[in-house]
Image (cartoon, grey):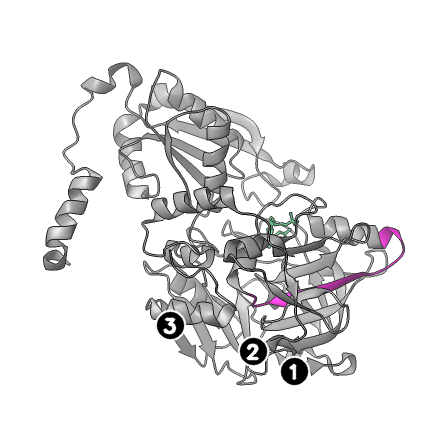
Amino acid sequence: MPDTRDRDLRSFIDRVDALGALRKVAGAHPVHEIGAITEVAAGKPNAPALLFSDIAGCDPRFRIFTNATTTPQRAALALGIDPMLPPLAALKAWMQRRQTLKRLPPVNVPDGACLQTIVAEDDVDLGRYPVPVWHKADGGPYIGSGSIVVMRDPDDGWINASIYRVQVHNRSQVTVQFDHTGRHGAIIAKKYWDRGRSCPVAIVNGPDPSLFVAGFEYLPEGYSEYDFAGAIRGAPLETIAAPLTGLPVPGSSEMILEGDLLPMTQQTLPEGPFGEFTGYYAADTRPGPVMNVRGICHRDDCILFGSPPMKPPRFHFGLPLRAAGLWEALATAGITDVVGAWQHVSQLMTVIAIRQRYGGHAKRAGLMAAANSYMARLVVVVDDDIDPSNLADVMWAVTTRSEPAETIDIVRDAWSSALDPRIPPDRKAAGVTSHSKLIIDACKPFAWRDDFPTSTALSADEAARIEAKWGAVIA
Ligand SMILES: Cc1cc2nc3c(=O)[nH]c(=O)nc-3n(C[C@H](O)[C@H](O)[C@H](O)COP(=O)(O)O)c2cc1C
């Protein structure tokens, strides 16, 4: 197993470079151009990671890193999994490893590279940094498109460190966007506000990528993302007390913003719109909670981290982590012989692969997967000879093994979200966040599966043997 201890973003970038997956881009403009280059690169088959330097009109000491984990290979690297594993094997390895992970709380250390430059309150000016306007119709520049918002629960002191987007509004004010009031960050902020206080916040930009992964895991209340990131690394995060708020922040991060999130009764600013991961602007501009930035610290030659949402299939993370959760949930529910799970189209389509054992097995898996697939309108169940991570293979099964008149079902009023672009405006205004889901059973019909025409294609093992013997000749 490879070394799992990426100590910081820079060592991760070095490892990406060593894999040949980094491209350096000089001279791009932060308004629309960096976002556009990021999107075009993410759409290429190798979807390279990008390091932007000499950003037009900006202080040359600052760079921006994007497309960090957009491929299965780099996602595996961030998880401490062998980056050479094929995608489905990497997801399975993560699933197995995740089950054995133990919380590893951070350790406090006295100093960190993020303290190299400290900007006092009077000198705070967010306009000094290269903050991209990522998409063409965004409401403004976003300094946080994959940064970690750190807050301490005022009751029992636990630290929440999750990803919420952060829009810059002026020299010293940003908004933090909670998709809904159930986000842990929103719950913690409300506790302060209900007591008539502002909520102390630190925004961490460019930490060790394990914290990026932890920052969007659904962890239970009280389980700090810091502990989960430590578990992924196999070594605790090293945190320092942020100079102003005293909140623990990873000392090797690139930049920390500190300040207070004001009660929404005191001030709000119009947040958004911001291009979403569905590839649309489907949520309106809303009043967002305002953070007064009262201090900034950063590395002298800071690399800001950018992870803007993009039109599918481009996605923040090259392995569909939620598919691993689904796979586990199916097993826990007693559905046997699930051999694979994957999500395509930025998680808007779920595929489950099974070794059919009885009539109704595929439907059972499909219904269970549909119930638990967030925002996915399309659920496909395939046989075990189909690689669910290979969309062409999946569509071959759909077009040759399913019979629309017999093997398609629609489930109504199922789990979606306010970001769903296809919920009609009047229903969205009424608070509807559900949609219907199509379940396609693309398995060979169970009753006559043994008589189903034989495939002409090589099995995966046969193809691998040919690859091993002749791969270099036909490369
Ligand atoms: C790149 C990226 C950006 C995200 N942006 C937001 C956001 O702006 N608002 C939000 O509520 N969730 C956002 N999320 C999802 C949350 O980070 C995720 O659901 C997380 O588990 C929420 O943590 P919590 O349960 O501690 O609130 C984003 C996720 C990623 C990967």
* Mark linked to residue 302: 2
Q: Secondary structure at mark 3?
A: strand
Q: For the residues marked 1 and 3, what is the alpha-carbon distance in whole angstroms?
A: 27 Å
What residue is drawn where x is 75% and y is 48%?
187
Q: Could you tell me how many numbered marks the image carries?
A: 3
Nearer the observer: mark 3 or 2; the answer is 2
User: For the magenta stretch, what is the residue range?
Assistant: 193-207
* Mark linked to residue 117: 1
Residue type indicated by callout 1:
Thr
Q: Earlier in the sequence, mark 2 or mark 1?
A: 1
Q: Earlier in the sequence, mark 3 or mark 2?
A: 3
Position in image of residue 315 (x %, y %): 46, 54
Q: Which residue is mark 3?
A: 23
Question: Is residue 17 among what the camera can see?
Answer: yes
| Apparent side of residue 220 relative to residue 212 in the rendered image (left or right) | right
What residue is drawn where x is 71% and y is 81%?
119
Q: Quadrant of the N terminus?
A: bottom left
Residue type indicated by callout 3:
Arg
Question: Is residue 171 among what the camera can see?
Answer: no
Q: Earlier in the sequence, mark 1 or mark 3?
A: 3
Q: Are marks 2 and 1 in contact (CB under 8 Å)?
A: yes
Residue type indicated by callout 2:
Cys
Position in image of residue 331 (x %, y %): 46, 29
Position in image of residue 90 (x %, y %): 38, 48
| Apparent side of residue 458 relative to residue 25 in the rendered image (left or right) | left
